[in-house]
Image (tube, coloured by chain):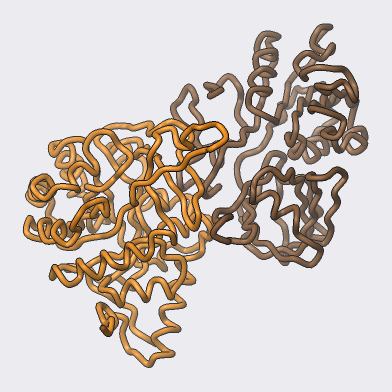
């Protein structure tokens, strides 16, 4: 058997396949489809200090080989998560990684502090790249000084593994990665969605209630691969590669570009079992190429 | 609830009118209990143009013969391609999804108001109502007689009334203008499915008459099983997922979007 284990900071993952925040809920609905313990980890839906109803409907537009969304971080708040959701998922034998959001640095810190004591939440993903909220979110992730400020503040408040999720809506994502690495991030995940929009020509109206939204799916894969490759060459911390991964071949490509692990996002909407197929496919690839461990492939792109 | 995710084979396709299809699919596995109002997510062909699955109400099911059927009205790219399927073609299905229409224990007589493609969930509901000896009146509305489908099927389970905008079948006008609403209104419950403005108008009549009303919504979905949060509808208890807390809602709970 090929060895699928990977290490992110001081955490061992049984395989490099995790699921992206906002594409898997808190795992409860997906446990109706398969045994979640097969996953490397679960990045749960984005959390904020207080309940958020999110943006108005319509929040979704199907686009060529992808989709736009503008959900706007609908969630019931960190306290609800701790009291009502965490007890239902803490039995899971996989990494539960909380996705942390805020409108201000203080809010990011407040959510983070409450997560410190949850034993089964082994890491947090600091989301400074959500394009669908008016306040905070991506505004922190598109300039180095603000990205450093929020990462530094959260780093001081959090004892365990800190992953920072980067926005692709920047001039130089490698510079952003270096900035958060310098501020204490243990890992980076990239890319979040790319800003985009859809128009209904007949009605002359935008499809989304928010006019613009975040583009995901295979349409963004080439962009994401390039960004992962650039960041891999610029930082020492491990990378979670994200962006239109639909199958094991896509996952291998992200690993070759420098991802230690990957996140499956939009593909979950089309095939709830896709992550299992990706895990099996990676194993099959390793056998076929006679490679003992998946870790050997990280950044193994031959140029 | 057990869910099926499997490739199904088209065993029958029938098109009574251009652009309208009844498609029957063979399941490779035992079909779990389907409740009236449940839907399936159909992966049409996973091309760049039709990237996501499409949700469709389950029309009918045969547990022994292991088939499941759908009514498809060709509107967008996805439904058009579904309509183009032929006998022997394969499509991937996930079901049963969503909640279902409820039947109160004391219900004696109910009204079902349908518009356009809103006929889909009501064959299964009619069967359940018959088992419980509930009297049913079906009111079907459409632009013209071409859009009034399944009437002979519905007539097996109760009285069928029709309403068309051009008067080509039944009374002329919108369903909510039907003479039925002018007389004594002795229904214990109103069920509705169809375009949202129609359902909203039906709900208003029901509320005015002091009758309970359940509506099935049809918002755009990315996943259909509760994880993307794209299909939400505003309710008096915040935004709810049409695919998970719905698609059937008590109308008193809804804040209509139209």
Tell me if residue A145 comes above or below residue A94 in the rendering. above
Q: Residue furthest bottom?
A: A290
The C terminus of chain B, quarter of image: top right
Tell whether A206 sits left or right of A120: right
Residue A94 seen from this side: no
- Residue B65: x %, y % from top left: 83, 60
For the residue pair A54 and A141, the one nearer the viewer reads as: A141
The picture quadrant where one finds residue A51 is: top left
Question: At 74% across and 43% down in the image, what residue appears?
Answer: B73
Question: At 48% across and 27% down in the image, what residue appears?
Answer: B234
Tell whether B12 sits left or right of B29: right
Tell me if residue A28 comes above or below residue A60 in the rendering. below
User: How many numbered marks are there?
Assistant: 0
The picture quadrant where one finds residue A17 is: bottom left
- Residue B40: x %, y % from top left: 65, 50
Q: Residue furthest top?
A: B183
Q: Colour of chain B?
A: brown
Tell whether B95 sits left or right of A109: right
Residue B210 seen from this side: yes
Question: At 32% across and 67% down in the image, what residue appears?
Answer: A225
Q: Colour of chain A?
A: orange
For the residue pair A291 and B31, the one nearer the viewer reads as: A291
Question: At 79% across and 62% down in the image, what residue appears?
Answer: B86
Tell whether B45 sits left or right of A249: right
- Residue A203: x %, y % from top left: 55, 31
- Residue B29: x %, y % from top left: 71, 65
């Amino acid at each position: 058997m090929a060895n699928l284990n990977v290490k992110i900071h001081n955490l061992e993952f049984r395989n490099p396949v995790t699921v992206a925040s906002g594409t898997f809920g808190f795992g409860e609905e997906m446990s109706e489809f398969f045994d979640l313990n097969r996953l490397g980890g679960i990045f749960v839906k984005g959390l904020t200090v207080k309940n958020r109803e999110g943006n108005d409907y319509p929040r979704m537009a199907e686009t060529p080989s992808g989709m736009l969304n503008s959900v706007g971080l609908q969630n019931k708040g960190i306290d609800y998560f701790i009291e009502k959701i965490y007890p239902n998922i803490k039995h899971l034998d996989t990494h539960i990684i909380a996705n942390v959001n805020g409108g201000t640095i203080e809010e990011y810190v407040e959510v983070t502090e409450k997560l410190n004591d949850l034993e089964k939440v082994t890491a947090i993903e600091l989301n400074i790249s959500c394009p669908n909220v008016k306040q905070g979110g991506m505004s922190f992730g598109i300039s180095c000084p603000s990205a450093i400020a929020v990462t530094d503040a959260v780093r001081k408040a959090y004892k365990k593994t800190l992953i920072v999720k980067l926005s692709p809506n920047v001039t130089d994502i490698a510079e952003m990665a270096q900035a958060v690495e310098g501020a204490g991030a243990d890992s980076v995940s990239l890319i979040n969605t790319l800003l985009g929009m859809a128009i209904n020509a007949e009605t002359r109206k935008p499809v989304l209630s928010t006019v613009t939204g975040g583009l995901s799916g295979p349409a963004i894969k080439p962009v994401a691969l390039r960004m992962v490759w650039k960041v891999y060459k610029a930082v020492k911390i491990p990378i979670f590669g994200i962006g239109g991964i639909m199958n094991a071949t896509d996952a291998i490509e992200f690993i070759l570009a420098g991802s230690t692990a990957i996140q499956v996002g939009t593909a979950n909407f089309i095939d709830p079992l896709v992550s299992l197929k990706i895990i099996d496919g990676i194993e099959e690839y390793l056998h076929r190429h006679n490679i003992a461990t998946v870790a050997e492939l990280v950044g193994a792109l031959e140029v | 609830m057990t869910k099926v995710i499997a490739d199904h084979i088209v065993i029958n396709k029938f098109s009574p009118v251009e652009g309208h299809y009844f498609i029957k699919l063979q399941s490779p596995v035992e079909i779990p209990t389907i409740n009236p109002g449940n839907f399936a997510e159909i992966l049409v062909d996973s091309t760049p143009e039709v990237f996501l699955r499409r949700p469709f109400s389950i029309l009918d099911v045969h547990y022994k013969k292991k088939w499941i059927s759908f009514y498809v009205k060709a509107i967008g790219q996805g439904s058009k391609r579904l309509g183009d399927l032929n006998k022997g073609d394969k499509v991937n299905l996930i079901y049963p999804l969503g909640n279902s229409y409820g039947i109160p224990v004391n219900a004696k007589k109910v009204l079902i108001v349908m518009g356009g493609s809103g006929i889909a969930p009501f064959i299964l509901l009619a069967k359940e109502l018959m088992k419980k000896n509930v009297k049913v009146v079906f009111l079907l509305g459409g632009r013209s007689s071409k859009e009034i489908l399944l009437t002979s099927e519905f007539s097996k389970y109760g009285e069928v009334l029709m309403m068309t905008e051009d008067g080509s079948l039944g009374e002329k006008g919108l369903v909510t203008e039907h003479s039925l609403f002018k007389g004594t209104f002795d229904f214990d419950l109103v069920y509705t499915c169809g375009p949202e403005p129609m359902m909203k108008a039906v709900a208003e009549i029901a509320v005015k008459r002091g009758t309970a009303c359940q509506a099935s919504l049809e918002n755009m979905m990315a996943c259909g099983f509760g994880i993307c949060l794209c299909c939400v509808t505003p309710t008096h208890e915040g935004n709810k997922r049409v695919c998970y807390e719905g698609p059937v809602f008590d109308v008193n709970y809804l804040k209509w979007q139209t």
